[in-house]
Image (tube, rainbow, N blue to C red):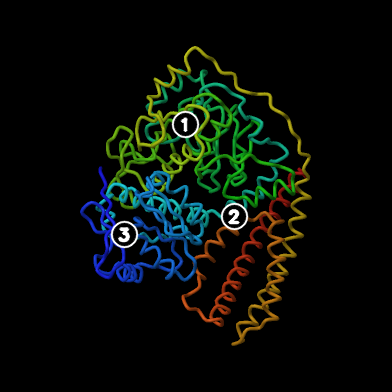
Amino acid sequence: MSISVEFLQAKNGDETLKINEYFIHSKYNPIKEAEQLVDRQYTPHHTHIIFGYGCGYIVEELLKRRAFQENIIVVDPLFNNQTLELKHQASNLFAFNSKVIPIFELYINEIAANTRVSFKTICTPNYDKVFPNEYKELLRKIVDLQYKNRTNDYTLIRYAKEWQRNFIENLRNLNEDGTIEELHKQYNCPVVVAAGGPSLTKQISLLKKYRNNMILISAGSTTNSLLSNDIEPDYVVTIDGGEPNYNHFKQLDLKNAEIIYSMQNHYKVRESFSQRGYLIGTHSFNKLSNYLEKELNLKLPTLEYGGSVAHAAFNIAHYISSGPIALIGQDLAYTDNLTHAANNKNARKIDEAFIKEQEAFQVEGYYGELVWTNPVFQSMKLDFEALTMVRKPDAPYFNCTEGGIKINGFEQLTFESFLKKFASNIEISKVTKVNDIDLHLDIHDKLKRILINVNELKELLIKGLTIVKKIESLNQIDQKALKQLDNIEKKVNKLLDKIPMEPMTNSITIDILNHYLPAENETTIETYKRLNRQTKALYTQLQDAINYTEQCIKNVLENSEVENNE
């Protein structure tokens, strides 16, 4: 498409812009037009995404209008060849050409981490007509990212208590299990990552035929489908902390498969495995990782982008082998109107009621056809695509699902072709000898140390809430009280570094960020009262979190004493 760019003079003497046959700004008064547009579109506490820079009038007016230094992201295809350039730099102003759109979520997650789902998109007049494809793709990316972040936030809040409990309970396994680092590049062979999508069923016969010619990794509950077909995987990856995940495993007795899990994984799942396990770190909980490293001298390798068990399994495959990787059963869609592969405990047929309940929608499928998916699956798809963009894997990888959604960035190959090409005439020996590292950790003593810090934090929170209550009764600013609260806050933050409770504090942070935002033109007294309400909410929720954490620790200590006495 050829682009004709003309800079012309508006009736009031300002510069205006015409691209092809479209005026981008007013022919009469472009600045006034921009002022009116910004008055209508500006939304406090949102990241503003501007499609089309033009002469920069909208961006300049938004810079003047924003009340809280909100992020402004400008995307303009004419930045590609420097036809247009930003007039000047400003704080929290970011400019990109259209090449960024396919990987837009990677940038916006870094730039707009705090706004999460609060994005305001503004299209400079007629840019959507000049660059319709780019604009549609950008809008789709923004909607996908909102779905993804909303899902992640819901998951974080929903599972905060379970993750907290599991971390404390899983501390008991540290002396028995190793870290995934012990398996780093131990293999140079094909690795098959099996997920539980409906299309897994048709791959079972090939899995059996080539079982000794691959390392087989099962993603979570997929293990049930494999075992029901007399296939035991080499490794089972499990990171889900909820009771449903435990229900998938509680009846299983895996003799040879080894578990690879995170500290947030449901602690009872470990009981279903006879062999030694391996721990992995997670990106979501940096403070927990810091605690393990500082307090226990244990560094868990943290793998790449993606939050589901399927992403973890894919990352682990590349981590342990330099050979080719195949994904199977990774439908991320309701292939053949089914939710899961046969013999998965959650498997069911879908119907119109299910589609409505799941907010399902249609997208391009593996073969180019339309398939039904949902926001959660779409979020997982985006994470898979991001995995190959953030850091391209150093070994070939293929989507051999033969069904479901199309995952961009993956070479599609039939599973049979993958096996014939990479797994014929070789036999794999599973690594059995690893570096036996005995940490000699006295977990009992560590938990008691945490309880000491817990009690100190509880006392600080009581003091803080007493001061907050006093402030509530006053109609003027009490500088002495503010100084006292400031000192308490510093001590609270130091103690939180010593108490592993990040799952709980993360969910609290989401709530505080969303509900105590400053209003425009807020007076000093209004700010004072708002921050006092915020502190009260924060300390009250921290009290609940610390009480729950304390109970988790006491449960572990009591159970340990019972076990020792038996």
Residue at x 45% of width, y 39% of height: 384
In this view, 260 is above or below 523:
above
Q: Nearer the viewer, mark 3 or mark 1?
A: 3
Residue hosting label 3: 124
- Kind of element beneath mark 2: helix
**Amino acid beneath label 3:** Thr
Q: Is residue 511 left or right of residue 336?
A: right
291 or 546, which is in the foreground?
291
121 or 556, which is in the foreground?
121
Q: CA distance from mark 2 to mark 3?
A: 41 Å
In this view, 389 is above or below 52:
above
Residue hosting label 1: 194
Q: Nearer the viewer, mark 2 or mark 3?
A: 3
In the rendered image, residue 410, in percent from the top left (x then y), is placed at 41, 32
Quarter that holds the C terminus: top right
- Kind of element beneath mark 3: loop
**Amino acid beneath label 1:** Ala
Residue at x 39% of width, y 20% of height: 417
In the rendered image, residue 407, in percent from the top left (x then y), is placed at 39, 37
**Amino acid beneath label 2:** Pro
Query: Which badge, 3 or 1, comes first in the chain's sequence?
Result: 3
1 or 218, which is in the foreground?
1
Query: Which badge, 2 or 3, comes first in the chain's sequence?
Result: 3
272 or 529, which is in the foreground?
529
Residue hosting label 2: 503
In the rendered image, residue 333, in percent from the top left (x then y), is placed at 36, 40
